[in-house]
Image (tube, grey):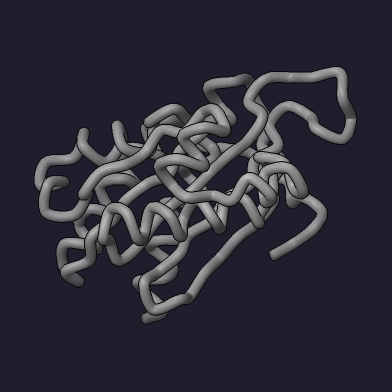
Amino acid sequence: MTDSPTNFTPSQPSTVHHLAAQVVEACTAQGLRLGTAESTTGGLLGHLLVSVPGASKVFIGGVVAYHGHPKMNLLHVERATLKEYGSVNTHTTLAMAEGALEQLEVDIALAESGIASPTDNPDRPGGLYSLTMLHADSSEKSELVRISGDRSETMYGAAEILFGWVLEHIQNS
């Protein structure tokens, strides 16, 4: 996990759709099941995955937890984690991914929480996302990322990064 965000410039949405297709294909070939815990993207990860024919072999489901209540009640993120670290933090997205892994009974869980739109707060700028990929074998990747662009572009950027991590994990397994 990193404490300071890395910068990322997202590709076009068509690239992200292509990555989603690659994720479905790779997970199908490996017999892996995938689930999501989404906040700021509001279900975009799941939407991109189910847009791919054959996704039902791979994508089990997702939890859209925009507010703290579903993070705590559905994904079992501890209130203390949210209070201590806030929602845009790798501790929180790791807890969200752990909840998705357990609740959805999947092999890989993707979690994100972020700030999609510009803000006046330099400590919480627009495009700041916390991203986590967690595999049932306990391998994990979490990172704080600053994604450039407007609200929609940052959301697609988060999906692009997470799908890239899944493909990287499968290739290295």
The quadrant in which the N terminus is found is bottom right
Residue 100 at what x, y percent from top left? Answer: 38, 53
Q: Quadrant of residue 9?
A: top right
Above or below 15: residue 119: above
In-image side of 73 versus 83 (left or right)? left
Q: Is residue 155 visible?
A: no
Q: Quadrant of residue 3?
A: bottom right
Q: Is residue 71 left or right of residue 47?
A: right
* Quarter of the image where the C terminus is located: bottom left
The answer to whether 6 appears left or right of 73 in the picture is: right
Q: Which residue corresponds to the image point at 42% horizontal and 30% vertical from the top-left?
A: 13
Q: How far across and how far down the image is residue 44, in percent?
A: 39, 31
Residue 132 lies, with reference to residue 136, above or below; the image says: above
The one of 19 and 56 positioned closer to us in this rendering:
56
Q: Is residue 60 above or below residue 168?
A: above
Q: Position of residue 70 (x, y in %)?
A: 46, 34
- The reply to whether residue 81 is in sight is yes
Q: Please give left or right for residue 110 compared with residue 120 in the image.
A: left
Give x and y (percent) for residue 80.
Answer: 69, 49
Name which residue lies at 18% across and 40% down. 52
The tally of labels here is 0
Which residue is at a point 79% across and 19% down the rendered structure image?
119
Q: Residue at x 74, y 62 (%)?
A: 2
